[in-house]
Image: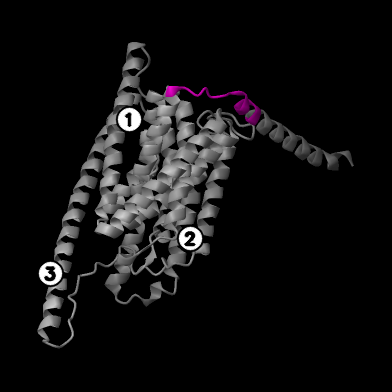
Amino acid sequence: MPNKMNPILETLLTSNITHQWIQNHFKQSKETHLEITSKVLISGVLCFLSASISSAGGIGGGGLFIPILSIVAGFDLKTASSFSAFMVTGGSIASVLCNMFITSPKHSHKVLINYDIALLSEPCMLLGVSIGVICNGAFPEWLITIMFAVFLAWSTFKTCKSGVIYWKSESEEALRNEFEKLENEVVRNGNFGGDVVEGDEGIKEPLLGEEKGRELRFPWMKFGMLVIIWFSFFFIYLLRGNRDRKSIIPIEPCGVGYWILSSFQIPLAIIFTVWILLCKHTNPDESKQTGAHAKAGWQSNKLLFPVMAFLAGMLGGVFGIGGGMLISPLLLQVGIPPEVTAATCSFMVFFSSSMSAFQYLLLGMGHIEAALIFSCLCFIGSLIGLMVVHRAIEKYGRASLIVFSVGTVMALSTVLLTSFGAMGVWEDYAAGQYMGFKLPC
């Protein structure tokens, strides 16, 4: 009988220890209070404005939040990163709530969020972020700063170039519509009779084939799959521990168990991606596509999104920012419309940022109340920014405003984060610290 009771006692003891561990972390977080100063208030206003600009482009804004909180408010990098995770989550919640119900006349009044792109991208993006975080701990700061400056400068240039192209295309379309309107008036006034036949606009085939899954009704199945993916990766993160090696179970930092848990993410991402591809392949709507060329194009296009998401997530983990800022220019480059890109990126950012916020919350962080206040500010700022941009798009027909918003945020992030990183590199060099490659943990 005693032998049979040991596993039960051990389970109860373990659960009590885990419960006590979580209580201690929350107690430590509540014991620290953030002093409200003029610098904190100014940083709050700047973050509010940054959230309103970032939400228009569907990117999180962490590239602006972290420098503002570090330089203006004087937060250390760890506190600024934890605040940024909550702020990006607050802004993305506002964007997702709006984009779930906003429809576009240009896209047959379909919901702007493309859940297929989000499903194909999310597993590989989460895997890329995890690998990027490991590389961040191994790469020297000067190398990360140079890579960040070069990549974001290139992305900013390509994004602004895309914005100019969209702007010119919209201007030509506006002139063409005015000409057709004038021509129709002449036909009606002249009583020439006959029906006016509208010209073929040369509608481009979407990259993911026919967009069947973006009706106004909510896709519960796809959302449920995303939630399963989120919980799967989140559970591995909790068991493995965060960058400070805090875990809910006793595990040796950088030990065998740590790397085994980390390696589980690779087959997990592959299994989820294959599962999603098979579900998409067996979708009855997809079987309506005819022709070997269309099917081959669909297969090649599907694999492009996981690759882009993995690259964006890995670079985001290396640079210490969200993947939304990096995948948004990539989606624009492959021909996804600006409105769909912004809505889809904000939806993907919600899952990645909320995972980071929950990790900070459960594994112990200070100033939770202040972080929630900053998150509410970003929520309100994002709502205002989204309403202003969508009103401008409806009035002027300029979806390119979204592209320019992304380019503006990326340009500011390039300058701020590069300058911030260069200052840190110089301080390390002046202090005589080691400037080479390190162990990942």
SS of the residue under disc 3: helix
Determine the image quadrant of residue 166: bottom left
Determine the image quadrant of residue 430: top left
The three-letter amino acid code for the residue at tag 3 is Phe
Q: Earlier in the sequence, mark 3 or mark 1?
A: 3
Whether residue 58 is visible: no
User: Does 33 lie within the magenta span?
Assistant: yes
269 displayed left or right of 28: left
Q: Residue at (88%, 38%) from the top-left corner?
A: 2
- On screen, 358 above or below 164? above
Point out the frontmost of discs 3 and 1: 3
SS of the residue under disc 2: helix
Residue identifier under label 2: 275
- Mark identifier at residue 417: 1
Residue identifier under label 3: 179
Where's residue 70, x and y in %? 40, 25
Q: Label 2: few (<14), some or many (≥20) within 10 Å?
A: few
Q: Earlier in the sequence, mark 1 or mark 2?
A: 2
The three-letter amino acid code for the residue at tag 1 is Leu
The residues colored magenta run 26-38
